Structures are given as C-alpha cells and as structure tokens.
Amino acid sequence: MITVARILGAVGAAYGVEPGAIAGGGRCQPLAEARQLAMWLARRHTRLSLPEIAVAVGRRRHSATVLWGIEATARRLREDREFQLVHDLAAALLAGHSGKTERAALELFGSEAEIAAGLALEEIKLRRAANLQARKAERAAARAEVL
C-alpha cells in the first residue's frame, strides 16, 4: 500500500531533500515544487480526500491548495521536460523499480560516470537553479518580443 509518507520519501529522494522539509512550511520554489508533486502523486496513488492530502503534506485542510498543486503539477508535466524527469524518478522510487530509477537518474543528472562519482547534491541543485533561471530569461525575452 502506498502512503503519503512513502510518497514524501520518494519525492524527497528525487529532489535531494528530507521528506520533513517537503511537509514543512518552506515556500522556496524547490520545496513548493516538490510538495506539489507529492500532492499529485498522493491524489493518484491513494484514496485520500483533498483535505486529507493537505494535512498529510503539512498544509491546512484547504482542498483548494491541493487542487492548485495538482493542476500546477499536471501543467508542468505537459510543458517541462526536466520536471517530467524528476516526476519519473520519484514515481520509479515510489514503485521500487530500480531499472527505471537508474534510467531516470541518468537522463536527469547526466552520465553514468557522474552518478558513479556521486555528483554532489549542491551541484545538482545549482544545475536545476541555472535551468530555472534560463527558462525565466527565455520567457521574459519572449514577452519582450510580444510587446
């Protein structure tokens, strides 16, 4: 049986953060993104109601918060390849499929040599932050062209 604690563990492993941090009150983007992914996975893999999911991931009993997180995750899964890879890694960890986990990690983090060398978590976070900044700059440039 898949529980929210197990989901938080898988998402935490995919993001390189503690499950408690995901369920905590942190509002920085990586934690909010991880929390939204956990909400989406909880809705998909458990029979919990939206308010129950909200409480399980450290939010108030507001189903609107969970609904927003689920919708934001669905949107990002359609539009963001890197986020899809993080989702695939978390889903593979959740399901316990080591082959899928290795493939998702390879695609997300780079070569087998980097993974075998134990690429530092901080470097992975820096890469994700740099990718995020690049996407923001692309969107800003596109908006500037429209104006």
Image (cartoon, rainbow, N blue to C red):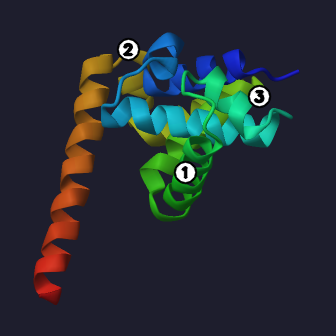
Mark nearer the N terminus (2 vs 1):
1
Q: Amino acid at mark 3?
A: Ala
Location of residue 125 (image quadrant): top left
Residue 128 screen position, x and y as percent: 30, 39
Measured in 3D between alpha carbons, the distance from the residue under mark 2 to the one under mark 1, in whole angstroms, is 35 Å
The quarter of the picture where the C terminus appears is: bottom left
Seen from this angle, which residue lies furthest front? Answer: 61
Q: Residue at x 55, y 51 (%)?
A: 68
Residue contact at pointers 2 and 1, CB within 8 angstroms: no
Q: Is residue 89 visible?
A: no
**Disc 3 residue crowd, few under 14, some 14–19, many 20+, Cα 10 Å:** some
Q: Residue at x 43, y 17 (%)?
A: 17
Measured in 3D between alpha carbons, the distance from the residue under mark 3 to the one under mark 2, in whole angstroms, is 23 Å
Q: Which residue is mark 2?
A: 118
Residue 103 screen position, x and y as percent: 59, 37
Mark nearer the N terminus (1 vs 3):
1
**Disc 1 residue crowd, few under 14, some 14–19, many 20+, Cα 10 Å:** some
Q: Amino acid at mark 1?
A: Trp
**SS at circle 2:** loop
Mark seen at residue 68: 1
**SS at circle 1:** helix
Mark seen at residue 107: none
Q: Residue at x 73, y 28 (%)?
A: 52
Q: Residue at x 54, y 46 (%)?
A: 69
Location of residue 10 (image quadrant): top right
Residue contact at pointers 1 and 3, CB within 8 angstroms: no
Comparing 88 with 25, the one in front is 25
Q: Amino acid at mark 2?
A: Gly
The quarter of the picture where the N terminus appears is: top right
Q: Which residue is mark 3?
A: 95
Q: Is residue 107 above or below residue 144?
A: above
